Image: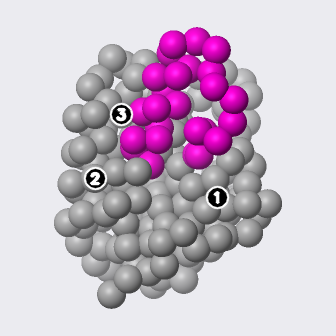
């Protein structure tokens, strides 16, 4: 299963699907969380996600150093979920990092990963054109991130109304 990318809109079932796929794999399950509880609403979302995945996942928080966390956690004897690339991108942009460099580093790592990784990301480019330059920059960077990651993943699914649609069926 080495890289699986699950993309979709808000509340489409992406995280639930990632948990389902990870639970099909024997071995240690690691959940890399990119969200930070910057407000009460986000803290509630994080708590809900923790409860949904239960105790069978070890959580690693990596709001910025996602590649470093993956290097430390990916192995052939378990599975890693990254939830989610969209929040990671937002964190990178807020931090002032070079998003293109970080995106390429992530894709390069995933292309050579030694074990299964399930990545969750939002599809934000299918709606209205954002009003602000920052919004447009974010939308474009998210599209590039999804494209780069999808290119190196063996499988890509698009979630619609809780249903996974195969965009890139598993290869080899």
Residue that appears at 48% across and 72% down: 168
Question: Residue 170: x, y in percent?
Answer: 44, 80
Instruction: Report the front residue among 12 and 76.
Output: 12
Residue hosting label 2: 107
Residue 81 drawn in magenta? no
Say which element carries label 2. Answer: helix
Residue hosting label 1: 14
Task: Measure the C-alpha gap from mark 2 to mark 3.
Answer: 15 Å
Which mark is first along the chain, 3 or 2?
A: 3
Residue 29 shows in this picture = no
Instruction: Report the front residue among 114 and 167.
Output: 167
Question: For the view shown, which residue lies furthest in the bottom direction?
Answer: 172
Up-down relation of residue 105 to residue 150 (above or below): above
Which mark is first along the chain, 2 or 1?
A: 1
Residue that appears at 46% across and 32% down: 140
Residue that appears at 44% across and 27% down: 91
Horizontal relation, residue 116 to residue 127: left or right: left
> Which mark is on residue 135?
none
Up-down relation of residue 16 to residue 96 (above or below): below
The residue carrying pointer 3 sits among few (fewer than 14), some (14 to 19) or many (20 or more) residues within 10 Å by Cα, namely: many
Instruction: Report the front residue among 81 and 29.
Output: 81
Residue hosting label 3: 64
| In front: label 2 or label 3 | 2
Do the numbered discs 1 and 2 sit on residues whose CB atoms are within 8 Å?
no
The residue carrying pointer 2 sits among few (fewer than 14), some (14 to 19) or many (20 or more) residues within 10 Å by Cα, namely: many
The magenta region covers 122-146
């Amino acid at each position: 299963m080495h890289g699986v990318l699950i993309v979709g809109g808000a509340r489409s079932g992406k995280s639930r699907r990632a948990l389902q796929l990870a639970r099909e794999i024997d071995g240690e399950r690691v959940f890399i969380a990119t969200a930070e509880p910057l407000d009460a609403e986000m803290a509630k979302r994080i708590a809900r996600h923790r409860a949904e995945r239960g105790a069978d996942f070890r959580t690693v928080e990596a709001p910025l150093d996602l590649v470093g966390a993956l290097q430390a956690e990916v192995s052939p004897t378990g599975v890693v979920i990254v939830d989610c690339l969209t929040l990671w991108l937002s964190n990178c942009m807020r931090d002032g990092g070079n998003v293109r460099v970080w995106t390429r580093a992530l894709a390069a790592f995933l292309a050579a990963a030694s074990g299964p990784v399930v990545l969750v990301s939002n599809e934000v480019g299918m709606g209205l054109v954002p009003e602000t330059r920052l919004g447009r920059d974010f939308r474009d960077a998210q599209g590039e991130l999804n494209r780069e990651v999808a290119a190196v993943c063996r499988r890509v699914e698009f979630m619609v109304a809780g249903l996974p649609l195969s965009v890139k069926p598993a290869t080899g």
